[in-house]
Structure formats: C-alpha cells, structure tokens
C-alpha cells in the first residue's frame, strides 16, 4: 500500500496545535559532492532536509546539490547523475553539508572548493561534514583546534593527516556551533534532525523523525558501534610491541605506565608515539579494547557480567558497566539482549 503523502503532510504540519504561526525565514542549504559520490550516501546527507521541505516545514528554502569539482556526478544502481550547481552556491549558503570524499589523501580536495567553504564560513554559514566529509573541512582549516568526529574506520587517518583536529571517533556527531561533524551512515541523519531541531524546534523535528520512521533524538554523545581495527604493527617498534602485548593480556589490569616501562621510554614520548600509531591516547585506546573484548564475550558466551568484567581486566562489574555505557552507549545487559547469539534467532521486532 502506498504512502498517503497528503495525509502525512497534514499530520506533520498540524501535529502540534501550539506551533508558532511565524514561518522560518528563507534559507540556502547546500550539499557538496565530489565525483563518484554514492547515491546511498545522499539519503543521509540530503534526506532530513529534503523530507522537511517536501512536507512544507522549510518554506522558502533553496536546497541545492553542488559539485565540489568539475564534472562531479552522483552514482549508484547503474545511474550517473551530473551535479548541476557550481561553487558560487556554496559562497551564498547558510548551511553547507559535505557528506563524502573519496579516498582522503594528504593532497586533499581541490583548492577552489576549500576556498569557497572558507568564504561561506567567514560570512556566517554553518558547515557540516559527514562520514569522510570532515576531511574536507579539515583541509580547509575549519577544524583546527576543534573537536570533530568521522566514521570510526577513518578516525586514525583523520588524526594522522590533520593532527590539529581533536578527533573523537566514539560519538555519533559533534556540534561545535558553526562547524559540525558526524560519523557514517545513520549518524548523518541524526545530525540532520539535530540541525532541523535547532532551526524549527523539537516538535517539528520529532514529527519529521516519525515521518522518516527513525528515532526522534539520538544525542551526539551516544556511541557509534565501533569495530576498532588494530593498526598494522611494525615488530621493530617498541611501542608497537607493547600494543601487541597489551592485546594478549587484556584480562590483566595494568597501567599505561607499565607499557611505557616495557618500551623503555618516558611516559611523554610513549604517549606521543602511541597516538601516532593508533590516533588516540594510550589509556583511551586500552579502555576501548577492553570494551571491545567485553562486547565479543557478551555476544558469544553466557558468562555473567562480573565474569566478563574479570576476563577484560576490569576490577568489578560496576567498573565494566560504567565504561561500557560510556563507549557503547548502552549497558552490557542491553547489548547482550540485542547482539548475543541467543538474540540472533529472535530476529528484529
């Protein structure tokens, strides 16, 4: 059965009888894409704003997709869609979203798009990067000294290429006022709803979330579900050796200082080299690896939570719960109910 869009729009617009009569001012929203941008990524970058405009919540809004480089096209499913607008639309925008950059490298995106982003930001536009999009903002210098996130698999690369950025891969999105970043996939939709909430208020944002059949509000600090890969290690590097050793001994409690001693390095030099290899501080990385091991045990075993804590180097179940909630955003019990081998047979409800 098809969706009754007229009924849905009426419900969206009239759902809150206390809604203010004043309509939002005209806005210029731009999504910047580079050649080869996957069509699927556009649903996250463009979807919340496109649906809000479709249902009449953003009257007067000029919503455009802009080519970040000459000849850019969006591709997917056998389609190739040329991008119609040029960089001048970025300079005039009130909100610029960059959802995707293929193969982030030290060379970075073309300078003209970086200059356009700087110009838009300088005149007061908010700028957002999703998934690999934060690499574009970082290349433009808009993330220098700021907190930012990206897809968890790209975090170490972002920290390596742009060491002045305070990368936090554990969160869904970061709102730093005029510059915002989000992880991959649905985190981009979360950020879109967050931006609409800031424009129109919670009532409209919640109605839009119901229209999209997504959670109305996942706060930015909620964790990405992270499968944190271990970087390729150089056996001749003393810090890399301690990383390999730590992964084999996560069931033991040991301080970072013990790893520095094992590497025969000062704590300061050890921390610096550790961050170069992993993209994060030693204590943060170690706690994260302990939580990842706890996730595996919760998924694959029936061990009580206090036993899981012991196998992962936590002093108590309470310590595991606190760290697990901080990293994963849920309790160990809730995680097990969703992801354990017993839950697999239940399917989605």
Image (cartoon, rainbow, N blue to C red):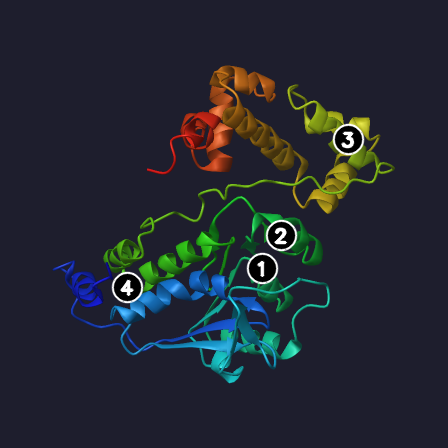
225 to the left or right of 334: right
* CB atoms of marks 1 and 3 within 8 Å: no
Q: Nearer the viewer, mark 2 or mark 3?
A: 2
248 shown above or below 211: above
Camera-side residue: 196 or 234? 234
Q: Position of residue 168 (x, y in %)?
A: 56, 47
* CB atoms of marks 3 and 4 within 8 Å: no
* CB atoms of marks 2 and 1 within 8 Å: yes
Residue 315 seen by the camera: no
Q: Which sits earlier in the primary sequence, circle 1 or circle 4?
A: 1
Residue 91's tag is: none
Q: Which sits earlier in the primary sequence, circle 1 or circle 3?
A: 1
Q: Which sits earlier in the primary sequence, circle 2 or circle 3?
A: 2
* SS label for mark 3: helix
State the CA–CA distance, disc 1 to disc 4: 27 Å
* SS label for mark 2: helix
Camera-side residue: 232 or 139? 232
Residue 154's tag is: 2
Residue projecting furthest to the left: 17
Residue at (53, 30) in percent of width and height: 295
* Count of marks overlaid on the render: 4
* SS label for mark 1: loop
């Amino acid at each position: 059965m098809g969706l009754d869009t007229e009924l849905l729009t009426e419900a969206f617009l009239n759902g809150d009888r206390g809604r203010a009569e004043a309509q939002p001012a005209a806005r210029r929203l731009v999504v910047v894409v580079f050649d080869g941008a996957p069509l699927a990524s556009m649903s996250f970058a463009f979807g919340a704003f496109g649906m809000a405009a479709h249902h009449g919540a953003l009257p007067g809004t000029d919503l455009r997709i802009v080519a970040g480089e000459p000849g850019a096209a969006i591709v997917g499913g056998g389609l190739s869609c040329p991008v119609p607008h040029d960089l001048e639309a970025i300079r005039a925008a009130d909100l610029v979203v960059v959802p995707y950059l293929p193969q982030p490298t030290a060379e970075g995106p073309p300078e003209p798009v970086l200059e356009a982003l700087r110009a838009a930001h300088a005149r007061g536009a908010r700028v957002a990067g999703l998934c690999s999009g934060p690499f574009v903002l970082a290349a433009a210098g808009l993330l220098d000294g700021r907190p930012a996130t990206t897809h968890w698999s790209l975090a170490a690369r972002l920290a390596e290429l742009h060491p002045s950025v305070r990368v936090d891969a554990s969160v869904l999105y970061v709102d730093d006022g005029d510059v915002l970043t989000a992880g991959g996939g649905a985190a981009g939709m979360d950020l879109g709803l967050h931006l609409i909430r800031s424009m129109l208020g919670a009532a409209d944002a919640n109605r839009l979330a119901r229209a999209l059949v997504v959670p109305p509000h996942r706060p930015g600090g909620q964790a990405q579900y992270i499968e944190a890969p271990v970087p390729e290690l150089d056996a001749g590097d003393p810090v890399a050796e301690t990383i390999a050793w730590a992964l084999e001994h996560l069931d033991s409690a040991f301080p970072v200082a013990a790893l520095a001693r094992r590497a025969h390095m000062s704590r300061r030099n050890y921390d610096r080299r550790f961050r170069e290899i992993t993209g994060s501080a030693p204590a943060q990385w170690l706690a994260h690896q302990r939580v990842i091991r706890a996730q595996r045990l919760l998924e694959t075993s029936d061990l009580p939570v206090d036993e899981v804590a012991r196998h992962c180097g936590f002093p108590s179940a309470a310590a595991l719960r606190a760290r697990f909630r901080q990293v994963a955003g849920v309790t160990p019990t809730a995680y097990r109910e969703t992801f354990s081998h017993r839950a697999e047979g239940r399917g989605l409800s």
